[in-house]
Structures are given as C-alpha cells and as structure tokens.
Image: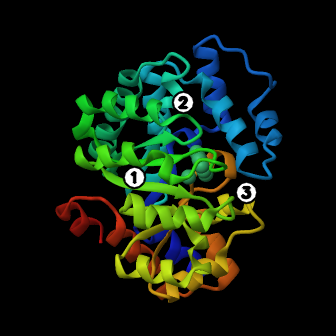
Amino acid sequence: SDLDDFLLKLPKIELHLHIEGTLEPELRFRLAERNNIELPYSSAAELRASYDFDDLPSFLTGYYDGMRVLRTEQDFYDLAWAYFEKAAGQNVRYTEIFFDPQAHTGRGVAFDTVIRGLRRAQLDGRRLLHLHVQLIMCFLRDYQPEFAMATLLESLPYREWIVGVGLDSDERGNPPRKFAEVFHRAREEGYLLTMHCDVDQENTTEHIRQCLHEIEVDRIDHGVNILTDPELLAEARRRRIGLTACPISNGWVSDGLKAPEIKRLLDAGLKVTVNSDDPAYFGGYVSENLAAVQRALELTRHDLVRLQRNAVESCWAPPAVKDRIS
Ligand code: ADE
Ligand code: ZN
C-alpha cells in the first residue's frame, strides 16, 4: 500500500537494539564453525524453529546461549556489520546499539576484544553505509553491582567510544536502586544514563519511579507501564524523557504488542519511540516493528512522523548529527 511504501522510505532511527540480539541463526552457525564450537542443532532453520519464548527469562536463556559463538574481534565486527547492512537497507540513518560486555568477559572474552570489533564496524558503517552509530554499554542487573562497577572502570580507557550506559537482563528482584552507585559514577564520567523497565515485569512501576526520582535517568527503555501512574507520566513528560518501546518484543514477553499503549503515550505527548530490541530472536527489525504498530492501530503518516521526531529528540547524537538526521 501507499503507507507501506511511505514507511519503507521514511528515514529511521533506532534507539533500543541489543547487538547480541541481532545474531541471526545463519551467522551463529558460520561463527560456530569458524571457532570450532559445536551447536546442538542440525541447521539454522532448526535453530530458528526452536525459538519459543513466553517470558523475559526464557528469552534470556536462549540469548546468552546464542552468544557463545562470539569469541574474536572479527566475530564482533561481523555481528555488528551484518546488523548495519540490514539497518541501512531499511533506511535507518542513526542507531544506538547496546552491548553486554559482562556476557563476554564472564566467559573469558576480553573487554578490549568486544569493543574493538564493534568500534571498527561503527567506523566502517559511517564510511561505507552512511549510517551513524553510537554505542551504549549495558550492565547485567542479575549480577552484583560490584561486577558492574568493575566493568564501568574497565570501560574508562574507551570512554570516548561509548555514549552512555544502560541496565538490562532479568528484572525480577533487581531494581534500579541496586545500581545507584554505579550509575552515579557513570554520570560523573560523562556517560548518559538509561535503564530497562520492561513491560509487565514485577514491580515495574516502582522501577520506573526509581529511574526517574533516584537514578535520574536520561531515558527509559520500554517504560510503557508508566501509563498506570499519572504522577510518573506527568514527570516524564515534563522532563521529556524518551521511552523506547519494542512492540514485537512485547508480543513475546507479555500479552501483546502494547500498540494501544504506544498510541496513548504518543497522544499524551510522551517521547515514545518504536524499536526492535532483539530482532534476530523476536523476528522483526525496525521497519517490521513500525509496520506491526501501524497495522494494529491504523496509525496515520502524521503518527509515524511523530514517532520519528520523538526519536530525533530523545537520541544522544551530537547537535550537528541531529540536524542531519531530522
Ligand atoms: N537483554 C537483551 N534483550 C533484553 C530485553 N529485551 N530485556 C532485558 N534484557 C535484555
Ligand atoms: Zn532491550
């Protein structure tokens, strides 16, 4: 349709994407072969067919298992490059990608290996695909804050390559407050701050409250449950806090895409955006996520443009880059 065509051509921004979540089964097989790692599947198709997540923990198990094939700097380069080509093909002009260093250092891959591979892909993406990429380092909230603090300190020699820090992984029993000291220090080092408050998780509204009032984040990842609390909603609007919704991901870990909630946030003047989270696992890059919300809600062109404008406003690009992508 006309609208599909419009969507395809729309210049896009992606603000919630885990680079390890872009590991497609085919690349996983290729890297496993290159690194002499045996996979318990006979083909990429069989691996893909095995994906069956019904909540966040069941997804995370598959996600961490998948990344065992990532070992060398070239592996991280190839992972990022594959995503950048995909994104450029969907007319993404700017993307902020999360990476999970602890998921690699915890199994013996050096921080330096991870970041150098991503950095080299980032520079090539800008040069060859005209795709502007920034890196956000996430801490795994199901580990102790001491491990996060050690990782923060380990990142400081690469400070100029990383725009901000986030918090992801299993939310149960791991509130933002657990990482208050780590995020305070990150802010002092000049990092911008975001944290996951995934949809319909335990204590999600309390987690959003801690993000806004205790950690004082610059953005919230997901955060759609803020609709249930008028005070928090008003505060996020007043502070123009970006909310990075991920509809297809929500469809796997909760009871639906949360498309009506996204529309309500948009209409309430919140800086909500639409993103893909872990596209290789959930089966949809940014265009498919926008199309899914569009189909569910019959969004107009004007709504789609508003979503993209929200992304420009809440992204962490330098002003000159913001001008170029808006
Ligand atoms: N790590 C990768 N994807 C995630 C998600 N959707 N929620 C929490 N942690 C994650
Ligand atoms: Zn996420």
Determine the CA span between mark 1 and mark 3. Answer: 22 Å
Asked if the beta carbon under badge 3 is closer than 8 A to the nearest atom of ligand 1, the reply is yes
**Res 286 quadrant in image:** bottom right
Q: Amino acid at mark 3?
A: Val
- Mark 1: which secondary structure? strand
Left or right of 154 on screen, residue 39: right
Q: Is mark 1 within 8 Å of ligand 2?
A: no
Q: Which mark is residue 96?
A: 1
Local crowd size for mark 2, using a 10 Å CA cut-off: few (<14), some (14–19), many (≥20): some
Residue at the spot of label 2: 103
Q: Residue at x 47, y 40 (%)?
A: 139
Total marks drawn? 3
Badge 2 or badge 1: first in the primary sequence: 1
Amino acid beneath label 1: Glu
Q: CA distance from mark 3 to mark 2?
A: 21 Å
Q: Position of residue 224 (x, y in %)?
A: 58, 71
Question: In which quadrant of the rendered view does residue 35 lie?
Answer: top right
Image coords of residue 20 (percent x, y): 54, 38
Q: Decide which of 301, 174 is in the foreground and name it.
A: 174
- Choose between 170 and 299: the one closer to the eye: 170
Chain-order first, disc 3 or disc 2: 2
Residue 141 lies, with reference to residue 73, above or below; the image says below
**Mark toward the start of the polypeptide (1 vs 3):** 1
Question: Quick one: quadrant of the N terminus?
Answer: bottom right
Q: Is residue 123 visible?
A: yes
